[in-house]
Image (spheres, rainbow, N blue to C red):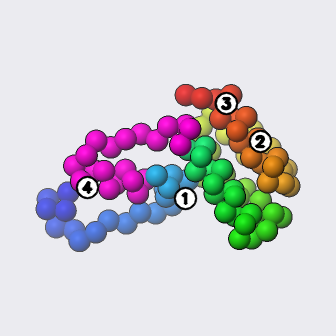
């Protein structure tokens, strides 16, 4: 791609917010490796880690409120995402958010 177009770099926008694994996929592509899909298990692990870090650095109340925004990106194009986002917007605790996300992924495994 770089040789064909002469570009020095590429820009990654908002896609990385809901798909942070895009960096790994780009690295695979640039290294001429097979670009791997991210499993639901890996996505769930990343989301749960994100929740932990948000709460650790911002506190539970602010961290959960901030996660609502990120969850919209994570859930984009997933089954029943609208209903899940509505549910998440009512959640106040880390435990409840984690349990809801785990249940959602168990219910809608691809």
Lower sequence index among marks 3 and 4: 4
Give the alpha-carbon distance from disc 3 to disc 4, as whole Å: 33 Å
* Residue 25 x %, y %: 37, 50
> What's the magenta region?
22-42
Mark 4 vs 2: CB contact within 8 A? no
Query: Which residue, given by chain and number where applicable, does mark 3 sit on?
Result: 106
Q: Could you tell me which quadrant the C terminus lies in?
A: top right
Mark 3 vs 4: CB contact within 8 A? no
Query: Which residue, given by chain and number where applicable, does mark 1 sit on?
Result: 17
Lower sequence index among marks 1 and 3: 1
- For label 1, the SS is helix
Toward which corner of the image does residue 36 lie, by quadrant?
top left
Give the alpha-carbon distance from disc 4 to disc 2, as whole Å: 37 Å
Q: Residues within 10 Å of mark 3 (few under 14, many from 20)?
A: few
Q: Which mark is residue 45?
A: none
Seen in the image, is 93 located left or right of residue 49?
right
Residue beneath the point at 59% across and 46% down: 45
Q: Residues within 10 Å of mark 4 (few under 14, many from 20)?
A: few
Residue beneath the point at 23% across and 71% down: 8
Q: Is residue 69 visible?
A: no
- For label 4, the SS is helix
- For label 3, the SS is helix
Number of the front mark, 1 or 3: 3
* Residue 73 x %, y %: 60, 52
Residue beneath the point at 77% across and 41% down: 99
Q: Is residue 42 visible?
A: yes
Q: Is residue 108 above or below residue 100?
A: above
* Residue 91 x %, y %: 83, 50
Query: Which residue, given by chain and number where applicable, does mark 4 sit on?
Result: 30
Verify whether residue 38 appears in magenta. yes
């Amino acid at each position: 791609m770089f040789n064909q177009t002469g570009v020095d770099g590429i820009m990654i926008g908002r896609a990385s917010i809901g798909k942070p694994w895009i960096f790994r996929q780009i690295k695979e592509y640039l290294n001429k490796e097979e670009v791997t899909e991210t499993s639901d298990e890996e996505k769930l692990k990343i989301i749960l880690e994100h929740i932990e870090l948000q709460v650790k650095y911002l506190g539970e109340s602010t961290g959960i409120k901030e996660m609502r925004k990120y969850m919209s990106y994570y859930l984009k194009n997933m089954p029943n995402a609208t209903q899940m986002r509505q549910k998440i917007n009512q959640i106040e605790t880390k435990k409840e958010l984690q349990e809801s996300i785990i249940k959602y992924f168990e219910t809608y495994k691809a």
